[in-house]
Image (cartoon, helix red, strand yellow):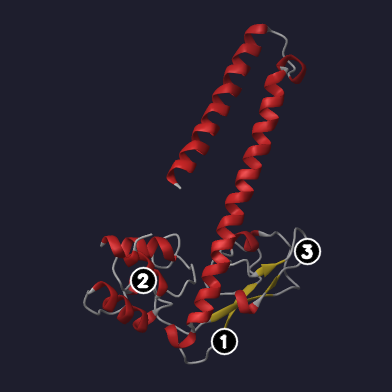
Amino acid sequence: MTALVAKILAVLPQTQCTRCGYPDCAAYAQSIALGTAGINQCPPGGAQGIEWLAAITGQPIEGLNPAHGVEGPRSVAFIDEDWCIGCTLCIKACPTDAIMGSNKLMHTVIEAYCTGCELCLPVCPVDCIELENVTGAATGWAAWSRPQAELAHNRYEFHSYRRSRDVGDNDKRLEEKALLKLSDLPSHSLHTDPVVLDKKRAVIEAALARARAKRGSGRSAS
């Protein structure tokens, strides 16, 4: 991360709401630094955020682009536990792990960790999640604080790490199963025809090669 990207990222509210058109605040900061995104695409940061970004980048102050939303008060998600079916979809969608619960058990939102990103709303199949204004007339950075942004950033970083780790663990388990099957293919297959077994072996070996190549490219990129 360049110094400019770090400065830009530091004044973004870290809601990870994606309203800017990018997958997270870091991606938006990177695009601003590259000149491929405007400084007026962050509704949670509002007018104050645009002023800070203008000062950092040297760009003129401009109004918030309405295509990305409007500046408003901070909201917190609440789950109607009488309607929650415990599907866990909102838990997976939350970028700061602010929702607690497990499969087929009702979920609840930890208010202090919720950024009001709204990403849990569209994935709920029973519409049991509502947003509540918790800052009254205060909007943008007046409804948010640097400590809250730092907390949200740290929780998103851990959320991203955990997701990556879980994917890696799952890939490792699948690879181990494939290697076990490959070590004695006849006993792990319903087929006995040597030609068919050779084809299956080639498919498994190719899949393993792709997985290793993908893992290798991930290491080199990091």
Apparent side of residue 85 relative to residue 19 in the rendered image (left or right): right
Q: Position of residue 192 (x, y in %)?
A: 73, 10
Residue beneath label 1, please? 134
Observer-side mark, 3 or 2, equals: 2
Residue highlighted by disc 2: 7
Query: Label 2 amino acid?
Result: Lys
Q: Residues within 10 Å of mark 3 (few under 14, many from 20)?
A: some
Q: Is residue 143 above or below residue 87?
A: below
* Residue 206 visible in this rendered orientation of the protein: yes
Residue 105, label in figure: 3
Asked which secondary structure carries label 1, the reply is loop
Which residue does the image show at 75% across and 20% down from the upper left? 188
Residue 106: mark? none
**Which amino acid type corresponds to the residue marked 1 in the rendered image?**
Val
Mark positioned earlier in the residue sequence (1 or 3): 3
Specify whether 213 is left or right of 201: left
